[in-house]
């Protein structure tokens, strides 16, 4: 389950011009992003570092994120790619993952403990699509977790 009382990561060197929208987005999504990252790292500090890097990347392109058709989905892709890049061994060629999206949804639901509407909020999708993909994941080997 997610911890609703996760301490925010110190922004430290973040630029002082962060918009109110960015700060609100960060506060809303930090606990869920951190819970997701903790699944991939043995040390909580490494998960926090990955999420911090993702938020720094988001801050750098925040106006473009807000101007995208689905800002939440665009932000989620940055978080996913940041976590994935930090978990891949150096010089490793990532293997294609046909079920990467289903795997992420299964992690968010079965491991992190988010309900379908919460997952939809995190990844920027509609609840019906998430429910359908979770059913698919349950029928596949992902559901064996």
Image (spheres, rainbow, N blue to C red):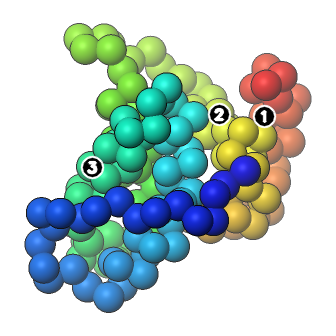
Q: Residue at x 56, y 45 (%)?
A: 36
Mark closer to the observer (3, 2): 3
Horizontally, residue 98 falls left or right of residue 44, namely right
Quadrant housing the C terminus? top right
Q: Residue at x 57, y 48 (%)?
A: 35
User: Tags 1 and 2 in contact by the CB under 8 Å rule?
Assistant: yes
Q: Specify few, some or many for label 2: CA neighbours under 10 Å numbering under 14, 14-19, or 20 or more.
A: some
Q: Residue at x 77, y 40 (%)?
A: 110
Horizontally, residue 128 falls left or right of residue 95, namely right
Using the rendered view, name the quadrant where residue 98 is placed. Answer: top right
* In this view, 94 is above or below 47: above
Residue 81 x, y percent position in the rendering? 37, 40
**Residue for badge 3:** 53
Q: How many marks?
A: 3
> Which is more N-terminal, label 3 or label 1?
3
Q: CA distance from mark 1 to mark 2?
A: 7 Å
Q: CA distance from mark 3 to mark 2?
A: 22 Å
* In this view, 127 is above or below 39: below
**Residue for badge 1:** 137
Name the residue at the bottom extreme: 20
* In this view, 18 is above or below 110: below
Using the rendered view, name the quadrant where residue 71 is placed. Answer: bottom left
Q: Specify few, some or many for label 1: CA neighbours under 10 Å numbering under 14, 14-19, or 20 or more.
A: many
Residue 56 x, y percent position in the rendering? 23, 58
Q: CA distance from mark 1 to mark 3?
A: 29 Å
**Residue for badge 2:** 103
Look at the numbered disc 1 and give the secondary structure of its residue: helix
* In this view, 33 is above or below 95: below
Q: Residue at x 38, y 39 (%)?
A: 45
Look at the numbered disc 2 and give the secondary structure of its residue: helix
Residue 8 x, y percent position in the rendering? 41, 65
């Amino acid at each position: 389950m997610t911890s609703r009382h996760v301490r925010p990561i110190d922004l430290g060197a973040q630029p002082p011009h962060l918009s109110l929208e960015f700060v609100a987005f960060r506060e809303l999504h930090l606990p869920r992003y951190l819970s997701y990252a903790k699944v991939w790292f043995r040390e909580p500090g490494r998960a926090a570092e990955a999420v911090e890097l993702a938020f720094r990347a988001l801050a750098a392109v925040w106006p473009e994120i807000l101007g995208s058709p689905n800002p939440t989905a665009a932000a989620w892709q940055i978080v996913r790619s940041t976590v994935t890049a930090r978990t891949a061994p150096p010089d490793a060629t990532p293997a294609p993952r046909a079920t990467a999206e289903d795997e992420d949804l299964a992690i968010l639901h079965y491991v992190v403990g988010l309900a379908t509407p919460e997952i939809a909020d995190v990844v920027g999708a509609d609840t019906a699509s998430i429910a359908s993909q979770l059913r698919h994941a349950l029928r596949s080997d992902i559901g064996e977790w």
